[in-house]
Image (cartoon, rainbow, N blue to C red):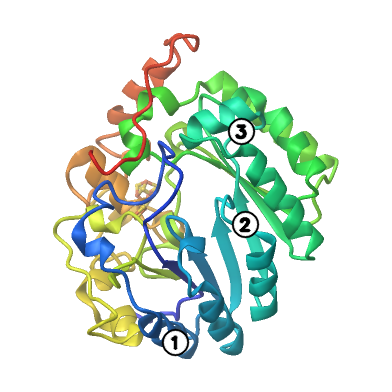
Amino acid sequence: MTIDRPLSLIAELTYRCPLRCPYCSNPLNYGDRQYRQELSTDDWLRVIQQASDLGVLQLGLTGGEPLLRKDLELLVAAAAKAELYTTLITAATLLTPERAIQLRDAGLDHVQISIQDSRAAESDYIAGTPCFEQKLEAARLVKALGFPLTLNFVLHRQNLDRIDEILELCEVLKADRVELANTQYYGWAYRNRTVLLPTRQQLERADAAVALARERNICPMGILYVLPDYYEDYPKPCMGGWGNQALVVAPNGDVLPCQAASSIPELEFANVRNHSLDWIWFESPAFNRFRGTEWMPEPCQSCDRRQLDFGGCRCQALLLTNNAAATDPVCHLSPDHHLITTVTKQANQENLDSPLPLVYRSMQM
Ligand code: SF4
Ligand code: FES
């Protein structure tokens, strides 16, 4: 099998974060000692150079909150020198004018800011801390400094009814690009699935609102709308396929094929402290475990779509079936598809006015 070179490196610089979003993509055990032993500046500089040598073109600097790393400007400068296109993926509450100017001078290409809702109280409720006004301020700062700005909204049952307002806010803040990502239910989001899973009616209204905003061309670089896979007939090609396009480096240096892969107990992940990115990408057992199509069970093995969706998401398969090698239950051909339909049926019967309490991201869990 030919292995392509990766396009993107997602650098999770730290799992520390001032926010407590109940759908955080960081692992449930993000507070463990292993993750508090973060890579040093020198480690990251080496990783950035190795990524460039490996053929990576894009670097996403994320977390947790990447602005908590005091060496962020140094890492951006190294990435710019290595000709990587750099995106800061931030909650933006720590983005001061001084810091933003330093990052621009270091060569940062693009800023993505997450906002939780169109209204202050609702946004702060999901973030678990007051921060809405700071985010708007940061978005204006990013635009004033001439960065391309992406606004990212994670969509769910509690904010989908304000999709029109969310799109209006994107227009007011002059976002160049908008990412509307329906929640993916692993990790923290899985814990909050009952509170976050939308109804079909909410999604239909959102589809219409997004179509209208696209027609009106409200942002020059477009609107990315990530559909909720629980309501699809086929699964998403998670990460563009396992070990196919991207690698994720966790704060402790473990290299993962996706942000949730540490949840798969059968896999051992190599670490940049001991191995080169090149070896990890091409040779490491974890990256080869679900690469390509040979590992697939039926019905994927004989399905025409196997090169399109790669059998779906391994982390979701594990979470729902206890087997990371199973067909993603989102697929209507999966023998486990009832695990999805039972939940969506229930979501469409429940009363929206009486949501259960959220489980916020916290170290106590
Ligand atoms: Fe994709 Fe497998 Fe479903 Fe076919 S059976 S559509 S390959 S998940
Ligand atoms: Fe891990 Fe989909 S999130 S494979």
Task: Note whether 176 is above or below 34 in the view shown.
Answer: above
Q: Position of residue 149 (x, y in %)?
A: 71, 57
Nearest to the observer: residue 314 or residue 261: 261
Q: Of the residues shown, which amino acid type is indicated by label 1? A: Leu
First along the sequence among labels 3 and 1: 1
Would residue 258 appear left or right of 204 to someone viewing this image?
Answer: left
Measuring 46% from the left and 61% from the top, which residue is drawn there?
68
- Which quadrant holds residue 293? bottom left
Secondary structure at numbered mark 3: loop
**Badge nearest the viewer, 1 or 2:** 2
Kindly identify which residue carries mark 3: 117
The quarter of the image holding the N terminus is bottom left
Q: Residue at x 45, y 47 (%)?
A: 18
Disc 3 to disc 1, C-alpha distance: 38 Å
Q: Quadrant of the C terminus?
A: top left
96 with respect to 269 (left or right): right
Q: Which residue is mark 2?
A: 112
**Residue linked to disc 1:** 54
Q: How much space separates mark 3 and mark 2, taking CA atoms?
A: 15 Å
